[in-house]
Amino acid sequence: MNTKIAVIGGGSAYMASVFQGIIKASKTFADAEFVLMDIDEEHLQLMYNLGQTMLNIAGCPVRLKMTTDRIQSLDGAEFVLTTFRPGGLEARHLDEVIPPKYGVLGNETIGPGGLFMACRAIPIMLDIARDVEKVAPKAIILNYTNPTNLVTAAITRHTNVRIIGICDQHVGEKYALANLLGINYERLWSNSIGLNHATWITSLRVDGEDVFPKLREFSRDMRGILDDNLRMSLELFNTFNAIPTYYLRYHYFADEMAEAQKKKGKTRAEEIMGELPSIWRSYEDAIKNKLPRPLLQRGGSDHGEFALEVIDALMNNQFKIKNLNLVNQNAIPDFPEESIVEGPAIISKQEIRLISQKPMPTAIAGLLKSISCYEELAIKAAVHGNLGCLLEALIAHPLVRRKQTAKLLMDDMLKSHQSYLPQFFTK
């Protein structure tokens, strides 16, 4: 029987990396049908044409379809990949540029902008999940839409749909560590746990050997470390004996990050908006000149391959261990049982479950528990359109905490995002 995989957000520039992943795993998906769905007809058509070009050149037998009808894309699907950005990059720009007006760091997931992104994304994802309940009740959603852990929690608690939160952030960080250690990425094993965009690598091994001692040598003398992200991670490793995800620098180096944002003079959203015209042209050139892949693209191959490897394991009962965002169920004892946490999980056709972990060191767990409390309030605010919960979530946010600042920030963000936040304005 053919497998139908719906991609909600199929007009995304990230789709080029998904096509690469499909081609790489062409044997796995030989009988599969990918249905791209998007509300942006122009970019949907472009990505469909690019996908057809890449698949045809590679001789990949996968069938590709496109539609702007969400129900049509979901009907009978076994897997649903959600990868879209409510409000687009314009909304992301607001998430990044408004908080600094009130002395708060701007970031699309870590900062308070992440709260408003959740408030934009969760209602749409709930609608999608309810459509899945009607026309594809056995489907599994693999969610890339940020903030993925908040979205995953909302769907888990308010629908009967199975959902897995996915994020490939840890893959890129492992590559960086492998390069630093001078080893092949495939030989590196890590145990990364916590919350999405707030994880810590508590163990790192090469061929079974602990490499923390070697990493400690780098952390003592970092004159040759030119990458600021890596430098900050090694500084924190030297303190906590665990390696933080890139995003934790916004908490532990808030002043440095604020200064860096100020010097840059533009938001990350503005940078991406400046890059996208060239990327779209690269896709058009690949189609016109029948290139096997575009010269420029948004995101690396890991973005597409990671999601497809998870689908492969579920389709073909291939036992794999991947870092996923799932219901805790006491796997990480530092968080409530019903929380969505990130950690290594066993994936097969029979089961999807997190691997049990030891309690995290107190110095690390403190901040993460604080983030978890903020996230619980954020989910309630997003689902119910509750202004009281929204204000409480901002006050609880580790990067805000001040009541007056939270109120001013909330009012400004609500006004700026009003068209995308109907739950707060239709009472």
Image (spheres, rainbow, N blue to C red):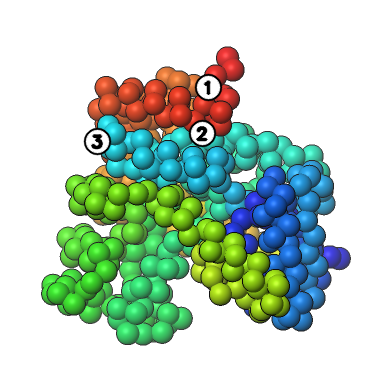
Q: Which mark is residue 297?
A: none
Q: Residues within 10 Å of mark 1 (few under 14, many from 20)?
A: some
- Hey, which quadrant is residue 87 in on the image? top right
Assign the N terminus to one quadrant of the image. Answer: bottom right
> Which residue position is annotated with label 3?
103
| Badge 1 or badge 2: first in the primary sequence | 2
For the point 43% across and 43% down, which residue is it? Answer: 93
Task: Say which of 265 and 307 sits in front.
Answer: 265
Which of pointers 3 and 2 indicates the residue nearer the eye?
A: 3
1 or 3: mark nearer the eye: 3
Instruction: Kindly state the secondary structure of the residue where label 3 is placed.
Output: loop
Q: Residue at x 60, y 65 (%)?
A: 281
Residue marked by disc 2:
119
- Compared to 256, does 397 lie above or below? above
Relative image position of residue 22 (x, y in whole percent): 67, 71
Disc 2 packing (10 Å; few <14; some 14–19; many ≥20): many
In the rendered image, is residue 326 in sight? no
Q: Amino acid at mark 2?
A: Cys
Q: Find out whether the residues at labels 1 and 2 contact each other: C-beta distance under 8 Å.
A: yes
User: Residue tagged by mark 1?
Assistant: 424
